Amino acid sequence: MLARALPFHSSDRKKTFKLIKEADPDFESDPWPSISYECKDLIGKMLIKDPKERITVDDALKHSFFRKYQRHIDNVKGEYIPVIDQATG
């Protein structure tokens, strides 16, 4: 959603899933260089393969990415109304 691109590159769906399961994310290719360090750091920690090493939800919410943009998050939270798309659930 942030970059409009997955951190794994392949035109083949099966290969993309294989990359998700086995490869490290690619934050060097476009559009990732334009994404903030804090954001890439958080996403990288969320994509760690080993669940024991992966960032927890509580730690993710305390990550510098959210602390840096907390004011913006607070402004949007009051206006946000979740909508469930009936087609996708």
Image: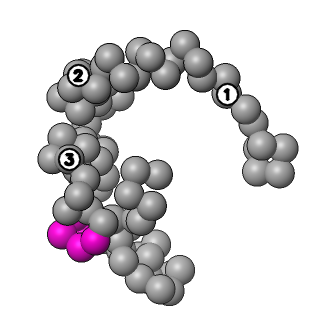
Q: Position of residue 74 (x, y in %)?
A: 41, 15
Seen in the picture, residue 66 relative to 2 is either above or below; the reply is above
Secondary structure that dominates the magenta span:
loop
Q: Residue at x 23, y 22 (%)?
A: 67
Disc 3: which residue: 36
| For discs 1 and 3, the disc positioned in front in the rendered view | 3
Q: Residue at x 35, y 71 (%)?
A: 8
Q: How many marks?
A: 3
Amino acid type indicated by mark 1: Pro
Dot 3 or dot 2, earlier in sequence: 3
Q: Is residue 28 magenta?
A: yes
Q: CA distance from mark 3 to mark 2?
A: 13 Å
Dot 1 or dot 3, earlier in sequence: 3
Disc 2: which residue: 67
Q: CA distance from mark 1 to mark 3?
A: 26 Å
> What segment is highlighted magenta in the picture?
26-30
Between 79 and 82, the residue placed more toward the observer is 79
**With 82 as the anchor, is 6 left or right in this view?**
left
**Disc 3 packing (10 Å; few <14; some 14–19; many ≥20):** few
**With 64 as the anchor, is 4 left or right in this view?**
right
* Residues at marks 3 and 2 touching, judged by CB atoms closer than 8 Å: no
**With 67 as the anchor, is 21 left or right in this view?**
right
Instruction: Tell me, yes or no, if residue 57 can be seen here.
Output: yes
Q: Position of residue 37 (x, y in %)?
A: 15, 47
Q: Is residue 19 magenta?
A: no
As helix, strand or loop, the secondary structure at mark 3 comes to: loop
Q: Name the quadrant of the C terminus.
A: top right
Instruction: Tell me, yes or no, if residue 48 can be seen here.
Output: no
Q: Residue at x 47, y 86 (%)?
A: 11
Coloring applied to the structure: one colour
Disc 1: which residue: 82
Q: Residue at x 59, y 18 (%)?
A: 79
